[in-house]
Each structure stands twice: as structure tokens, then as C-alpha cells.
């Protein structure tokens, strides 16, 4: 215990050396007590791998009641800092406060829609995008009956209670005339999708049962319509659909987009389960589980077809590629249906790679064009170690390829059992509200103008020392010096809380400085960060948005879930159309770069002392357009480097994207193990 607390106090002292003292009595009292208790601590030798780190101070509290959930009960004081009316705009919305009953009888459609739309928010068809109206729309336990589509708005997190998962259920006379899906994530209008599918960022839906079983089986109905782009997710959702013969129900429909993460979903019944990039999915009694791109950790059971990637036929294959990894297909006559053949078009279309796919009672593993069996299955159990079909690109290629190939070597450090390690985003649903500390209650403002460096550092240190979770209420937190995140820290945002750097400390391109420093060099331990955006304001030529130094214990890596970097292009950034327009008629060089628009040095640096680091659904973005401009006008913003990995240990990059940096997007330098 001495070693871990000495590390935490070292961080606190490091922060204090950078900043003017801010007197927050609760923080000061607690840190003084800790300093007294450990006045005799010393710097012991650094442990050698794989000795585990000590855990943070344990937090003892009675277990919450069955349906209690901290997000429902915590004081809500998040603000939309750059909204025209930040003092009155409501970020957190409990649907029951808007009149929803959740009693399984009342039509809650209008009440739910009011919870989503109130406050002048960004609606599809009338608003392209904006960062100024974030919202969390929360559903307590209950069954919410709807008679028509719920229309999702921009920058919305729709969250159910994970301890008593709420159901959104369609009445038998449900009509989709006002939208597509029980939840329509991008409503069609006269000119197509209301939001451009490649520009609809920053949204989530999680913790629900979506139920269409009352709708007649022969009527087409969709659970969620989800054309989507980066920094979006669907998680922890069960789709209950009709299992009758001829069913026309489908779980998720995604006809276009440019990204997004989908995971931890279960589909029961229906004609189609889903189509797009996905992980940790389960399908039962679905006619076609996946009608498709990229899939891993999938379970398909009692379906007619596991994956159908034959859309368009051999002459015009609509699916580019499917990679299926660490998955199981059971009691399904056709595992995968393709349209691939030696002469199929386009030549690179319909590519398929299978790796570590277990089959149980799947007579045909892969069926090709014309119903030809490309890969036989088995009436018993078998595992496809590595098999594929498509174009093989070699110095003498491309050539058509179909068959087995040597499986990729899997380093043991990346595995959990025989599969690649993965970890769903923590929601802390078993923790009572008393296990959380609010950043705003601890003295930070999040108003986008006040320097929150000292208050935020104190809140981070206090929460970690007490073994609590820091709740970063929605807001824009301005920092003018590095924030130090100690081992043991757990920080969760609200509708993508923003921490942004500002000032001259971060504007020296020859002396780069981290905005967030996660652990000190050669420090042991782990952290959990989720639902955050790290940004910059104005010229910040030396800003490294995140520096990750921690070496985590084996089998228990640090995790970043839905943690994004956003450089320019949003309200409050001082890096918008007015400051950083494109200059198509000016050649740079010889014309000088606009130094006011050099907005970052690097987005993420995983240093050589780091190991054991898991990232899931992370978008490191230099804005190419202004999100808060109605025309989404292009910008010219410079950030030197994207993600630099120099780590000496396992790193998992799951559903990550890095865009628009000048020198590189991903760079791996001396990374090992």
C-alpha cells in the first residue's frame, strides 16, 4: 500500500508544482491525512514483470438494490458549455420526467420523442450536425410501448438501466410511416438521409431489449436503423423478433456510413439479424444472422444461414470483404453464402477470411456462386483454423485464391484462452452512487472558459486515492497545464465530456507537452477511461493530447472505451471556419502555413514504458470540416502526428480510426512483445 500511495502522492506533487494552489477543503483535508499516514514512504525498486501492481485503496459500500443504477441517481449538473443558453439547456433527460410510463400499456412514443427533441436540438433534415446540444436520454427499468418510430437526434446517447434492462416494444399496430425502425438513427427525408451517413458522429444506444414480436410476422419491421460514422456505437442490446415462418423482421439495418462500433448484441428470431463492423454478437433462431463486413467473436445458433454475403450476385458483388475470427456457428445448414467465383466482379469483391471458426452441425461451411460447395462443413464438431477465398496479392499476382492457408501466429500475450482478448466497456452498474465523485461537485466548472486545471487535477487525485470513480459531468474543461492520471484512476464522461488544452504551455512545437499524461514513465498500474473527448483550443503546436506510460499487470490491461481526440472544427475550439478556412488558390509552400491553425503535435503517444493497453472504439480526428457549420464547410487544420506506438507489451486496437494528421496516422516504432 505504501508503494501505490507514494506514486499517487508523487503525481499530486507533480501537479501542484505546475499550478497555483486551489483550496478545496475536502481535497486538501484528505491529501493531508494521506501525507501524514505515509510520511515515511520511500521509493522502492521498480518491480519486474510480471509482478502485479497493488490495487487502489478499496472502497467498501453496501451493494445497491437490484435495479438501482448510479447514472440514474447521481446529481445531474452537466452543462453544454457552448450552447447559446448553457444555464438552461438540459443535458441529462430521464424519459419518465417527460411523461413516459414504461408500464407496458401506455403509448410512450410522444413522451420519449419529447425527451430526445426538447431544447432546440439537432433534428435530421433540419440540422446537419452540431456539438452544442449533447444529450443523455435515459430509460429507467420498464416496458415502453411505442406506436411509431422514435427519431434519434444528433449527439445523443440513449442509455437504459443495465441492472434492469428496459424494453422498447412495438404495438401490434405499429407503423413505420414516420421513420425506419423502432429507433431511427437517421430518418429519411425528401433528399435522402437527414444526416449525411458519413458525418453523423458521437452517439450511442446501449442497454435495451428491442421487441417487435407483437407486430405480425409478415410485416416488415426493423429494430434500429443505423447509418452511422465514427465515434458511434450500439452495445448491450437484445433484439426479440418474430420466429414464425416467413418472418420479415430484422434487427439492425445499416445501408451506408463510414464506421461505428457494434458489440455485445443478441438477436432472437427475425429474417435478418444485422449487417456492418461488429464484435461479440449472438444470433439464435434467425433466418439469416448477418446479411452483409468485419466480424469477430460471433455466435450463430439455429439459423437457416449464418452469413449471407452474396448480395448483387457474381456479376456485381455488393460486399467487399468479410473477416470472421474467433466465432461459432451451430445447427445452421448454410454457414456462409457467397457469390464469389473465378470470374466474379468486381475482382476483389466477395473476399472472405475465416480464422478459428468453430462449427457444430453445419453441413455446408461456405457455399459459393451457383450453389456450389466451396468448403464442406460437418454434422459434428470441427474448427476452421484458417481458410479464405478472393484475390491473393503477391509479386506475381493477383491470383484467385480459395482454400486453407497457414494461420496467423497468435502471441500468447494477446489471447484470452484460444481467442483474442476483448473487454466490453465498463458501466460500473454494480457500484452505488456513493462510489462516484463528480468533477463539478469537486470544484471544476466545465464552462469552457474557466481554467479548470487545478480543480480537475485535484478531483482526479482525490477519486483515485479514495478508490472511487470520477464522473466527469458533461462540460468543456479548459486546462492550461498537463493533467496527470495516476494508476488506479477510473474516469467516465457524460455524453462525451471534453477536456481541452489552451495557452502557451502547449504551443511550443519544439517542446511538446501532454494534455493528459496517463501514468509516469516506467510506472506500473492500470486505468479505465470512457466516454471522453480530448481536444485543443487555438494554436497548440506542441500539444500531445494523450501520453500513455503505464505498464499494466498481465491479463488486466488498462482500457480506453469511447475515448476520442478531436482537433478543431467544433464550437469553442477557435479552430473553425472563421479562423482556418481552406485556401484553394494559395499553394503551401511556398506560402507559409497559418500558424494559428497548427492545432496539435500528436494525438496519442503510447510510450516505450507502456504495456497492457486495450483500446476500443476510439477516433483520433483532425477536423476536415466544421461540425458546427450548417454547410459542413471544409477547413485547413494542421496536427503533426496521429498514433505513435513505441510500447513494450501487448496493445489491442479494436475499432480504432486515425485521420487527417500531416505526417502519419499510425506509426509503430520499436514496438515489441
Image (spheres, helix red, strand yellow):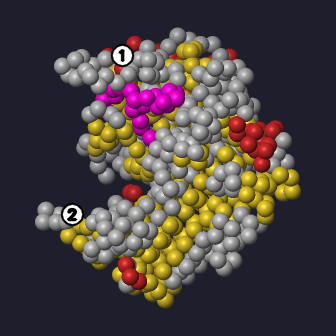
The outermost residue toward the left is 396
Q: Residues within 10 Å of mark 1 (few under 14, many from 20)?
A: some
Q: Residue at x 37, y 39 (%)?
A: 659
Start-end of magenta stretch? 616-641
Up-down relation of residue 480 to residue 362 (above or below): above
Tell me which corner region of the image, top left, top right, bottom left or bottom right, holds residue 584. Answer: top left
Relative side of 98 to 406, left or right: right
Element assignment for label 1? helix
Q: Residues within 10 Å of mark 2 (few under 14, many from 20)?
A: few
The outermost residue toward the bottom is 379
* Distance between mark 2 and mark 1 Cα atoms: 44 Å
Q: Quadrant of the N terminus?
A: top right
Q: Residue at x 51, y 67 (%)?
A: 290
Residue 159 in the image, given as x and y percentages of width and height: 67, 46
* Residue 291 shows in the view: yes
Residue denoted by label 1 = 596
Q: Residue at x 25, y 44 (%)?
A: 670
Callout 2–callout 1 Cβ contact below 8 Å: no
Residue denoted by label 2 = 393
Q: Is residue 219 magenta?
A: no
Residue 445 in the image, given as x and y percentages of width and height: 63, 20
The mark nearer the N terminus, 2 or 1, is 2
Element assignment for label 2? loop
Tell me which corner region of the image, top left, top right, bottom left or bottom right, holds residue 210. Answer: bottom right
Q: Choose between 667 and 437: the one closer to the eye.
A: 667
Q: Is residue 628 magenta?
A: yes
Q: Choose between 627 and 548: the one closer to the eye.
A: 627
Q: Choose between 425 and 535: the one closer to the eye.
A: 535
Q: Residue at x 56, y 31 (%)?
A: 130
Residue 243, numbered circle: none
Up-down relation of residue 361 to residue 632 (above or below): below
Relative side of 98 to 623, left or right: right
Amino acid at each position: 500500500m505504501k508503494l501505490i500511495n507514494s506514486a499517487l502522492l508523487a503525481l499530486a506533487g507533480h501537479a501542484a508544482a505546475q499550478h497555483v494552489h486551489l483550496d478545496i477543503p475536502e481535497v486538501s483535508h484528505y491529501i493531508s491525512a494521506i501525507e501524514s499516514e505515509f510520511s515515511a514512504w520511500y521509493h522502492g525498486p521498480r518491480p519486474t514483470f510480471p509482478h502485479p501492481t497493488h490495487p487502489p485503496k478499496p472502497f467498501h459500500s453496501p451493494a445497491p438494490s437490484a435495479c438501482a443504477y448510479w447514472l440514474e441517481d447521481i446529481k445531474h449538473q452537466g452543462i453544454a458549455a457552448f450552447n447559446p443558453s448553457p444555464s438552461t439547456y438540459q443535458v441529462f433527460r430521464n424519459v419518465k420526467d417527460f411523461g413516459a410510463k414504461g408500464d407496458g400499456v401506455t403509448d410512450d412514443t410522444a413522451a420519449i420523442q419529447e425527451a430526445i427533441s426538447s431544447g432546440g436540438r439537432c433534428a435530421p433534415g433540419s440540422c446537419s450536425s452540431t456539438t452544442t446540444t449533447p444529450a443523455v436520454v435515459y430509460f429507467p427499468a420498464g416496458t415502453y410501448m411505442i406506436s411509431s418510430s422514435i427519431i434519434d437526434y444528433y449527439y445523443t446517447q440513449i442509455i437504459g438501466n443495465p441492472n434492469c434492462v428496459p424494453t422498447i416494444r412495438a404495438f401490434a399496430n405499429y407503423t413505420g410511416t414516420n421513420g425506419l425502425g423502432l429507433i431511427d438513427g437517421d430518418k429519411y427525408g425528401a433528399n435522402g438521409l437527414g444526416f449525411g451517413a458519413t458525418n453523423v458522429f458521437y452517439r450511442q444506444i446501449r442497454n435495451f431489449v428491442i421487441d417487435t414480436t407483437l407486430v405480425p410476422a409478415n410485416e416488415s419491421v426493423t429494430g434500429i436503423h443505423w447509418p452511422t460514422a465514427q465515434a458511434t456505437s450500439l452495445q448491450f442490446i437484445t433484439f426479440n423478433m418474430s420466429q414464425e415462418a416467413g418472418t420479415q423482421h430484422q434487427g439492425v439495418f445499416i445501408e451506408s456510413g463510414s464506421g461505428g462500433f457494434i458489440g455485445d448484441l443478441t438477436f432472437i428470431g427475425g429474417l435478418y439479424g444485422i449487417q456492418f463492423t461488429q464484435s461479440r454478437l449472438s444470433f439464435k433462431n434467425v433466418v439469416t444472422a448477418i446479411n452483409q463486413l468485419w466480424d469477430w467473436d460471433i455466435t450463430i445458433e439455429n439459423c437457416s444461414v449464418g452469413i449471407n454475403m452474396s448480395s448483387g450476385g457474381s456479376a456485381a458483388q455488393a460486399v467487399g470483404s468479410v473477416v470472421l475470427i474467433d466465432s461459432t456457428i451451430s445447427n445452421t445448414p448454410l454457414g456462409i453464402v457467397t457469390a464469389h467465383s473465378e470470374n466474379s466482379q468486381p475482382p476483389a469483391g466477395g473476399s472472405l477470411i475465416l480464422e478459428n471458426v468453430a462449427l457444430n452441425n453445419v453441413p455446408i461451411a461456405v457455399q459459393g456462386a451457383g450453389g456450389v460447395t466451396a468448403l464442406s462443413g460437418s454434422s459434428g464438431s470441427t474448427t476452421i483454423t484458417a481458410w479464405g477465398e478472393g484475390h491473393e496479392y503477391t509479386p506475381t499476382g493477383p491470383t484467385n485464391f480459395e482454400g486453407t492457408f497457414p494461420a496467423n501466429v497468435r502471441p500468447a500475450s494477446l489471447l484470452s484462452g484460444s481467442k483474442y482478448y476483448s473487454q466490453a466497456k465498463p458501466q460500473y452498474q454494480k457500484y452505488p452512487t456513493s462510489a462516484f465523485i463528480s468533477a463539478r461537485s469537486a470544484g471544476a466548472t466545465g464552462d469552457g472558459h474557466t481554467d479548470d486545471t487545478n480543480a480537475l487535477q485535484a478531483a482526479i487525485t482525490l477519486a483515485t486515492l479514495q478508490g472511487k470513480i470520477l464522473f466527469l459531468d458533461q462540460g468543456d474543461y479548459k486546462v492550461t497545464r498537463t493533467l496527470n492520471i495516476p494508476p488506479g484512476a477510473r474516469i467516465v464522461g457524460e455524453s462525451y465530456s471534453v477536456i481541452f488544452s489552451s495557452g502557451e504551455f502547449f504551443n511550443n512545437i519544439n517542446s511538446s507537452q501532454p494534455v493528459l499524461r496517463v501514468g509516469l514513465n516506467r510506472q506500473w498500474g492500470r486505468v479505465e477511461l470512457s466516454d471522453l473527448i480530448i481536444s485543443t483550443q487555438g494554436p497548440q503546436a506542441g500539444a500531445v493530447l494523450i501520453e500513455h506510460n503505464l505498464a499494466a499487470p498481465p491479463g488486466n490491461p488498462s482500457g480506453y472505451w469511447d475515448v476520442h481526440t478531436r482537433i478543431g472544427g467544433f464550437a469553442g475550439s477557435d479552430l473553425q471556419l472563421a479562423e482556418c478556412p481552406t485556401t484553394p488558390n494559395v499553394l503551401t509552400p511556398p506560402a507559409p502555413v497559418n500558424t494559428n491553425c497548427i492545432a496539435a503535435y500528436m494525438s496519442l503517444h503510447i510510450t516505450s514504458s507502456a504495456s497492457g493497453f486495450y483500446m476500443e472504439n476510439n477516433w483520433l480526428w483532425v477536423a476536415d470540416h466544421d461540425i458546427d457549420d450548417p454547410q459542413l464547410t471544409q477547413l485547413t487544420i494542421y496536427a503533426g502526428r496521429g498514433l505513435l506506438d513505441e510500447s513494450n507489451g501487448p496493445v489491442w486496437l479494436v475499432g480504432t480510426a486515425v485521420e487527417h494528421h500531416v505526417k502519419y496516422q499510425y506509426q509503430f516504432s520499436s514496438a515489441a512483445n
